[in-house]
Image (spheres, grey):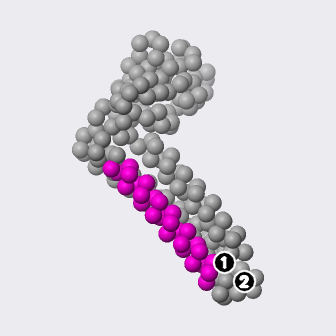
Amino acid sequence: MIDDAVKMAKDAMDKAKERLGRELARVRTGRASPALLDDIRIEAYGTPMPLNQLATISAADARLLVIKPYDVSNLSSIERAIRASNLGVNPSSDGVVVRVPIPPLTMERRRDLVKQVKEFAEEAKIGIRNARREANDFLKEAEKDKEISEDQLKKGLEKVQALTDDYIKQIDGTVAKKENEITNE
């Protein structure tokens, strides 16, 4: 019963941590990353499609993304969508590929990005605390229904809290690394 609660909490905490990782990958630092364009949808063949399904995206160097569409007829749509994406980049096309230079960040923009990263971290921590609450409620309900003893309840709550502390520490470390990346690149 205790193992079920811990496993349930761990699965939910893993999801919160993964979601944070995806969010942080999309935060623009001074370095070019294909993940920066993950949310961009292109109007192609009558439907909006993710950019990564219409082209290969690669980082040519630390400050340049190169997008090579599978179908050259989508080139202008790709360029237009990137411009409209509010990423602060200016794509250019040579008729074969789209080049997206990543400009250096200003200090004001860096502060905004750090604030955004902290908001993502807080959302992840809320997800982790919700997972802890659900696991604790599960254990308390099991104790109330006489499925586990009071001592087992206490041990289970301690295990869930230790798991929560570990995940919070991991998130703090990930966020500190990302903040360092933003402020020092």
Please give the name of the residue rendered at 47% of the width and 60% of the height, measured from the top-left corner: 170
Mark toward the start of the polypeptide (1 vs 2): 1
Q: Is 163 covered by the magenta stretch?
A: yes
Which residue bears the numbered disc 1?
A: 139
State whether residue 48 appears in this view: no
- Which residue is found at the position 62% from the left and 70% from the top? 134
User: CA gap, disc 1 to disc 2?
Assistant: 8 Å
Is there CB contact under 8 Å for labels 1 and 2? Answer: yes
SS category of the residue bearing label 2: loop
In the picture provided, is 183 more to the left or to the right than 27? left
Q: Classify mark 1: helix, strand or loop.
A: helix
Amino acid type assigned to the residue bearing label 2 in the image: Ile
Residue range highlighted in magenta: 154-180
The disc labelled 1 sits on which kind of residue?
A: Leu
Dominant SS in magenta: helix
Give the image quarter of residue 6.
bottom right
Horizontal relation, residue 112 to residue 162: left or right? left
Which quarter of the image is occupied by the C terminus?
Answer: top left
Q: Can you give x and y, in whole percent of width and height, for residue 22 in the image?
A: 51, 46
Q: Which residue matches tag 2?
A: 148
- Point out residue 52 in the picture as x, y percentages from the top left corner: 55, 29
